[in-house]
Amino acid sequence: MKKILLAGLCALMMGALPSRAQWGPRAIPEPTDGLKDAYKDYFMVGVAVNNRNVTDADQIKLIKREFNSITAENAMKPQPTEPRKGEFNWEDADRIADFCRQNGIKLRGHTLMWHSQIGPWMYQDENGNLLSKEELYANMKHHIQAVVNRYKDVVYCWDVVNEAVADSPVYPGRPELRESPMYKIAGEEFIYKAFEFAHEADPKALLFYNDYNDAEPAKSQRIYNLVKRMKDAGVPVDGIGMQGHYNVYGPSMADVDAAIKLYSQVVKHIHITELDIRINEDMGGGLRFNQGQAQVSDWERTLQQDQYVNLFKVLRKHKDVIDCVTFWNVSDRDSWLGANNYPLLFDSNYKPKQSYLAVKGFDPKMDNVVVKEDFKPSELNQPGQEYPMVNSQGYARFRVNAPKANSVIVSLGLGGSGGTVLHKDADGFWTGTTAGPMDEGFHYYHLTIDGGVFNDPGTENFYGSTRWESGIEIPAHDAAFYAERDVPHGNVQQILFWSASTNQLRKAFVYTPPQYEKNKKKYPVLYLQHGWGENEFAWHVQGHANLIMDNLIADGKIQPFIIVMTYGMTNGVRIGGLGGFNYNDFQTVLCDELVPYVDGHFRTIAKKDSRAMAGLSMGGMETHTITLARPEMFAYYGLLSGGVYTPEEIQDPKQVKGIFIGCGSKEGPDRIMQAAADLQAAGFNAKGYVSEGTAHEFLTWRRCLYEMAPMLFK
Ligand code: XIL
């Protein structure tokens, strides 16, 4: 969330910000380096290109920045290179090969023998009869060797045979291999021959067997079996190409991991040769082009990003055997799947997606982190609910029962990721753990199940983002200041007051300190506002304002005062609409209706010097405006992640007796501290405070209240 918050005052003013994923794709600045650089210690990052890609200046720039291996998407395949026997067509292949030669980019050869995109002359006569084995091998040899010879100065590896293994299910008695014409003529031997011909032409080239559904357990076993038989027969096969045409629902990373482990028992080189992750459930090489939706939803983007991030994590783990990962096409516009399937890291305008940043911006340290298995139920869980859980490192783990769902996302997650994607266990429960430790303190969240928004039945609900959200508490190391202790406790009571200006009965919560009922004393009052999306419950429920006060009073750190918490009328505002927010209505309710009501019904010191106003986020914005507009009302001002005061805007320095400005260390604190220093320099009693290790969230504001309270009413 940090970057959004830095973006400007507007964002800084917002209370419970919705997760990134709800905002749609954000423009990402043009990268200065590429995926190849991010992965230089792991493997090459390649891309499949067409003719346009290597002739358009902008696309060339992108390719050179991002990738250090290239595959010709179609140009080197059997049919394009030799549509009719002996009639070679090198134009497209040469252009791509020359591009690689000129730019010093490595070239993967794809592909020499495939049942698709192959001239029928290879395996049948003019009458459609299959050729003899000898004729087939002669055709294969002359074709394979012509292509390999032509590019052997620049091609470092070849997908020699493509997609020769049968798809699942393979019924008993059926062959493990695809019944292609070549197979029908020569059986498995045609595969061996293809490798031998290629090796003869270029003994230095690494030779791959390449296939799809490469992580599906049954098919990967068949791929392994084939390559194992080849190895045992002395066939020059060096590697296995996992095409990697995946989707956002599968394969599971456990299956990818298992397949890589299996393949690495028989080859020393594994390439991911054709990576894309489509947003629908089609798998493999089925060419059903227009299966995508017209519009990709934010939650689907989150699923895709999660699948990409987790896949690259598995690939990094296997860097000893994986030496190249190639994307199948440059951008969604080029994708063989059609742009609607949204499969790549660059969108239809060749702009990087959020998932590009996530794939690139991995933290190597996090790859080896061991998550401690000391998870305990979150303290905010409903009675008897085990999940969500929190561990001692601050990781959160979720478990949701949704047996018929296709996807479950928790909106809570790490910076910009759009949340934590849960995965389905065998028992129909969805579980998942945040990718890293969460900030200490309270967090709102919700579930997105197949695109619909729900609360987690495991936890209590808290009003934020203009709805009752689920909440989780990551225990803070300094939680003692709001802990439930055996000390005298004040009360929080609901009051109802008639507001003539809005013609409504309005509500507020009033904290009265311990002893209030027992003595006759009069007390100062702090009017304390919540943020955007929240309401009058926020400060005493998720903020623990009453407990913070009780503890401060018990420890003798403050003189007791009353706190009044009412709804700031902020929730009609939509994101981006803050500029047009009208403060007058709330100003009237607060200053001309609520304050007189409170002074009339509680033992307050009904004077300006004993009145303070403070607010968090958008409540800070309200505080700022109202304190300046009505200087006769309040003597102490507090802005909590809610902007700053400048000396110039305070007309009469004597109008204010104390100013508190605070925020979290993760929300650009420099401005806050500078503003406090400026105010002090101008002679104001001002205090700046930065909450370490927190962002725009409630632990920041709990701490701010704790730091601010002692300076009020002095
Ligand atoms: C695809 C190309 O991207 C398309 O342009 C073409 O029409 C069909 O082939 N597995 C492979 C690739 O090995 O060669 C295929 O490429 C995608 C599936």
Image: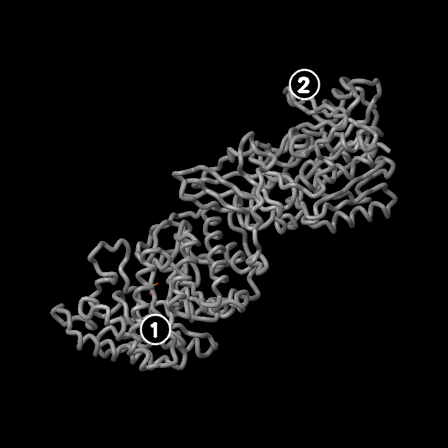
Query: Which quadrant holds residue 207?
Result: bottom left
Query: Which quadrant holds residue 554?
Result: top right
| Ligand 1 located in image quadrant | bottom left
Q: Residues within 10 Å of mark 1 (few under 14, many from 20)?
A: many
Q: Is residue 48 above or below residue 145?
A: above
Q: Which residue, given by chain and number where applicable, does mark 2 sit on?
A: 498
Nearer the observer, 247 or 315: 315
Residue 565 pos. (x, y %): 70, 28
Which labelled disc corresponds to residue 237?
A: 1
Residue 505 pos. (x, y %): 64, 19
Instruction: Using residue 424 as the reference point, say whether residue 566 is left or right of it.
Output: right
Q: Amino acid at mark 2?
A: Trp
Nearer the observer, 211 or 296: 211
Residue 562 pos. (x, y %): 77, 26
Report the coloring of the rendering.
one colour
Compute the Cα span from label 1 to label 2.
84 Å
Q: Residues within 10 Å of mark 2 (few under 14, many from 20)?
A: some
Q: Is residue 243 above or below residue 108?
A: above
Residue at screen point 28% across, 57% down: 167
Q: Is residue 415 visible?
A: no
Q: Is residue 702 visible?
A: yes
Instruction: Using residue 93 as the reference point, say whether residue 369 is left or right of it.
Output: right
Secondary structure at badge 1 equals loop
